[in-house]
Image: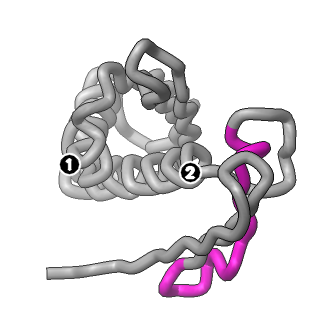
Amino acid sequence: MIEKKASAHWEGSGKAGQGTVSTETGALKTHPYSFRSRFEDDTQPTNPEEILGAAHAACFTMAFAVGAEKAGFTVEQADTTAAVRLAKGDAGFSIDRIALTLQAKVPGIDEAKFREIAEGAKKGCPLSKALAAVPEITLDAKLLG
């Protein structure tokens, strides 16, 4: 069993206040986040959706590399972005879509096997499983030559 920790600190009101997030490893150490970075145009601090997207992209990419290795292929490079959409509905805000985009170079693999491994990683990575309540998780996978 593995447990990883992260923490958040907040000061002030919801809209005017600001907070910091930290991770156990120190990868994020009192990194600022705010309402303005989440709902307005402030691009300096981070926000929960951006952090979630980074975590999902990292988990998926690692799962893809492990899946490729199990199938006998070595990933030369893999780059993933995760676009996390926060939408306002009748019940308030929710994440209604995560769009994963993968570009990978995997010598010797054919398109069908590449797609099979990518889809398996999308379904099987722990963060995809944890995010099962998100109505739409898409994958656009491109095999680089």
The span shown in magenta is 23-38
Identified by mark 2, the residue type is Pro
The one of 4 and 60 positioned closer to us in this rendering: 4
Relative to 48, 75 lies left or right? left
- Dot 2: element: helix
Side of 62 where 36 appears, left or right: right
Depth order, front residue of 110/102: 102
Dot 1: few (<14), some (14–19), or many (≥20) neighbours within 10 Å? few
Against 68, residue 4 (above or below) is below
In this rendering, position of residue 84 left or right of residue 123: right
* Residue 71 badge: 1
- Residue at x-position 24% and y-position 29%: 116
Residue 30 drawn in magenta: yes
Q: Vertical placement of 9 versus 15: above or below? A: below
Q: Residue at x 49, y 50 (%)?
A: 52
Looking at the image, residue 113 lies above or below residue 62: above
Residue 95 in percent (x, y) is at 44, 30
What colour scheme has been applied to the protein in the rendered image? Answer: one colour
Residue lying at the far front in this picture: please name it: 13
> Which three-letter amino acid code belongs to the residue tagged 1?
Ala
Which image quadrant: the C terminus?
top right
Nearer the camera: disc 1 or disc 2: 2
Q: Position of residue 43 (x, y in %)?
A: 84, 46
Residue at image coords 29%, 41%: 131
Please give the label number shown on residue 143.
none
Q: Residue furthest bottom?
A: 25
Left or right, 33 with respect to 77, comes to right
Q: Is residue 76 visible?
A: no
Disc 2 designates what residue? Answer: 48
